[in-house]
Amino acid sequence: MRRAGLVLAVLVAFLAGCGTGTGDLRLLVPTEVGGGYDLTARTVAAALAEQEGEPGPAVVVVPGDGGRAALARLAAERTRPDLLMVMGLGLLGAVPDDGRGPGGLSATPVARLITEPELVAVPAGSPYRSLADLVAAWRADPSRVVVGGISARGGPDWLVTTQLAAAAGIPAAAVRYAALPGDALLPAVLRGDVAAAVTGLGETAPQVDLGTVRTLAVSSAARSPRVDAPTLREAGVDVVFENWRGLLAPPDLAPADLDRLITLAEGVRSTAAWRAAVARNGWTDAPLSGPAFGSFLDAERARVRGLLAATP
């Protein structure tokens, strides 16, 4: 009887470790602190804490290998209902196919959360007063214009930079793009290590507010209410691009567990914490859940592959 009681106690403890409260959830971030994934994860955690009236998920930063380290961690916890990973377009472009799931990932799609424009930003004291100024200097001597971003090759910052260069008539082989950690990009801009940053609006908005950087253009189809800047098209470059972010769960998740995570993800949009973050970061709510999100991942993966194939 004593042995049976011990087994029961261990089972109860194990099930408690797989609890379903948001305090038991973990949110993986696949890149360094300071980037868009980290910002999104901490916003989701705050919104879930408000929504559920209990401690929010633990945010666990697992950087490395362009996101592969976090994806491997997610895949290793197959069927676990208490783990989510923030991801987005950058992960599809920077990470080769890891599995047979949507987007080539060994994971369960939960929900797309937001879309976000990229922006082209320079230091407040930069000689480039407009996108036309930057493009003119870039055309005149591409070797002297270094563009910085957070994304690796295939990620949104890199994609926008290469599309911007192509539309401006700058040879792809001449583009100097520097991929920097999330907390290092803006210091590099302010020091003049890079001529301009191409990155997400959310990560840059605080510096825009402080006046330390100036936005030359945004990549969305319409102007953003968050910053006073034209679109790339209005500035004379025919490029439209929006980044997005969402949530993945481990593979082989039970349907009931997936339904619960989708409900949690959809619920964050009703919280004051989420609404404030959307306005503050220049995001747009873009909910897409479950299988529909999976189909979206497949389409985005194909799109990014096409862009990568067209760029040396």
Image: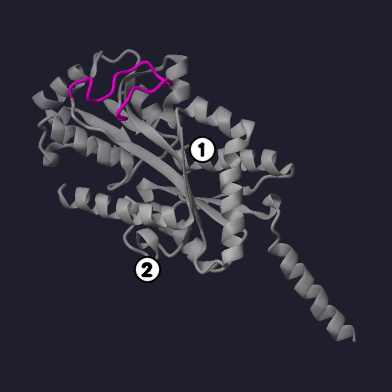
Query: Quarter-wise, where is residue 123 in the image?
Result: top left
The residue where tag 2 is placed is 100
In the depicted view, which residue is nearer to us: 249 or 151? 249
The residue where tag 1 is placed is 39
Percent x, y of residue 271: 63, 35
Residue located 18% across and 22% down the image: 236
Residue located 36% across and 47% down the image: 89
Q: Secondary structure at mark 1?
A: helix
Percent x, y of residue 293: 43, 53
Are the residues tagged 2 and 1 within 8 Å (C-beta)?
no
Given the image, on which type of amino acid does mark 2 rest?
Arg
Judge left or right: residue 23 versus residue 263: right
Q: Earlier in the sequence, mark 2 or mark 1?
A: 1
Q: Is residue 100 above or below residue 21?
A: below
> What residue range appears in magenta?
219-236
Q: Is residue 225 magenta?
A: yes
Residue located 57% across and 30% down the image: 275
Q: Secondary structure at mark 2?
A: loop
Q: Is residue 235 magenta?
A: yes
In the depicted view, which residue is nearer to us: 136 or 103? 103
C-alpha span from label 2 to label 1: 29 Å
| Number of the front mark, 2 or 1 | 2
Percent x, y of residue 69: 45, 58
Given the image, on which type of amino acid does mark 1 rest?
Leu
